[in-house]
Image (cartoon, rainbow, N blue to C red):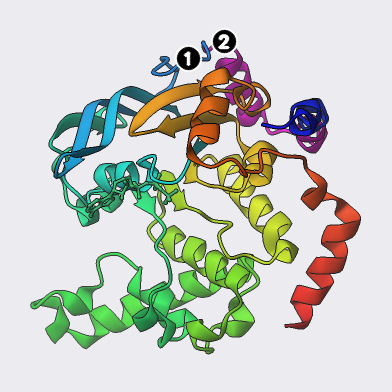
Amino acid sequence: MSADETTMTTQEAAAAAAAKAGPLTEDHKKVLRDLSNVEAKPGSSKPDAILTMDDVVRRFGGMTAVDVDHLEVQEGAITALIGPNGAGKTTLFNLITGFDAPNSGSWSFQGRSLAGKSGAAVAKAGMVRTFQLTKALSRLTVLQNMLLASTSNPGENLFLSWLPFTWKKHEAEATDKAMEILARFKLDTKAGDFAGSLSGGQRKLLEMARALMTDPTMIMLDEPMAGVNPALVQSLLGHIQALRDEGMTVLFVEHDMHAVRHISDWVVVMAEGRIVAEGPPESVMKDQAVVDAYLGAHHDTDLGDDSLLDPAILARLEAEEEKR
Ligand SMILES: Nc1ncnc2c1ncn2[C@@H]1O[C@H](COP(=O)(O)OP(=O)(O)OP(=O)(O)O)[C@@H](O)[C@H]1O
C-alpha cells in the first residue's frame, strides 16, 4: 500500500461513516451494536450467527483452495467476503450453496446442517445465491428469467401438470410476483426484452431480482459490482442495503473496495484459502494481514478512497446510464 493510500484510509473511514449516517432501522442499529462487541479476529463468534462453518476444506489436486477453520456470519448484517484473486472466495460460495462438494467440513444454516445438500435444497432452506446471466439465459426475456427462478412450478410435477388450472394459477401468481420485484428494480418496463439486451448494471439487478423470487432469508451475491457502469453502482448498493433493512442477511464477494466500505457491516478477508482477518470495514483494511495478503497477490489493488461515490459524479453518470 502506498503512503497516499495509507493517509486516505482516514478519509475513507469518514466517508463510510457519513454514508452510514442516514436513518438506520432499529434492526440495523441492533446489528451494529452486536457487531461492535465482536472481537475483530478470524473465526470470531457472533451473537446471532445465521451461518456457521467448521473445518471446511476443498482441494483441487495438490492445491488447497479452501481451508476455513471456523466462520460465523451474523444474521441481519451485510458481510463482505474479500481477498485477492484465487483466495478461494468463489469456491467457498460454491461449497456452502451446494454447487461443489468439500473434501471435509460441516456447516449449518439457522441451526440446520446443510453440508451435502444440493443447490436446490439449500435454496429451499432459504439461502440463495445469484448467478451470472449466462448466454442461454440472455436469449430469454427478462420475465422468463424471473419465472425460471420461481420455486415449485406445478407444471414440472407430472401429476399436477395434467391439471392446467393448477399451473395456470401458479403461473399467474408467479408472473404477478415477478412483475412486482422487477418494478422494485425498475426493470418492469423491460420485462419483454431479451435479458441479453440489458446493460451490465441492469443484468446485475436482474440477477438480484431472480434470487428474490424464492423469498430467501439469506442472499449471497457473487461480485455484484463486476462490469457495472459506475452510474449504477449507487443504485445497486442502495438495493443491497434495502435487502438488509428488510431483514435479509447478505453475504457478498466483491473486489470493489469502494462498495465494500460503503455498505458492509462486517468484512471477512480470505487469502490462500484461509480466513486471515475479520472486522468492521473501517478498520479491517488497515489490518497488517490484509495489507500483506493484497501486496503478496497484486500490488495495484485499489484499497482507495470513496471518490466514486461522490454524489455529483454519480448523478451525472446515472443520467448517462438512464439514456442507454
Ligand atoms: N474447478 C477447479 N479446478 C481446479 N482448480 C480450481 C477450480 N476452481 C477453483 N480452482 C482454484 O482454486 C483457487 C481458488 O479459486 P477461487 O475462484 O475460489 O478464488 P477467488 O477468491 O474466488 O478468486 P477471484 O477473486 O479471482 O474470483 C484458485 O487457485 C483456482 O485456480
Q: Please, is residue 259 above or below residue 131 in the view? A: above
| Amino acid type, mark 1 | Lys
Q: Please, is residue 277 above or below residue 242 in the view? A: above
Q: Quadrant of residue 125?
A: top left
Find numbered disc 2 in the image and state the secondary structure of the residue it sits on: loop
Which x, y percent locates residue 161?
A: 15, 82
Q: Nearer the viewer, residue 147 or 306?
A: 306
Q: How many marks?
A: 2
Callout 2: 10 Å neighbours few (<14), some, many (20+)? Answer: few
Q: Please, is residue 162 above or below residue 262 in the view? A: below
List the residue tagged with mark 1.
41
Which x, y percent locates residue 31?
A: 58, 24
Q: Nearer the viewer, residue 199 or 4?
A: 4
Q: Please, is residue 177 above or below residue 59 in the view? A: below
Left or right, residue 10 beside residue 104: right
Judge whether residue 17 is colored magenta: yes
The disc at residue 37 is 2
Q: Quadrant of residue 304?
A: top right
Left or right, residue 118 beside residue 26: left
Find numbered disc 1 in the image and state the secondary structure of the residue it sits on: loop
Which x, y percent locates residue 11?
A: 83, 30
Q: CA distance from mark 2 to mark 1?
A: 12 Å
Q: Nearer the viewer, residue 61 or 173?
A: 61
Whether residue 288 is visible to the viewer of this picture, yes or no, is yes
Q: Residue at x 31, y 84 (%)?
A: 168
Q: Nearer the viewer, residue 173 or 243?
A: 243
Q: Which residues are magenta?
A: 15-38
Judge whether residue 218 is colored magenta: no
Q: In the orientation shown, which residue stands out farthest toward the left? A: 159
Q: Residue at x 41, y 15 (%)?
A: 45
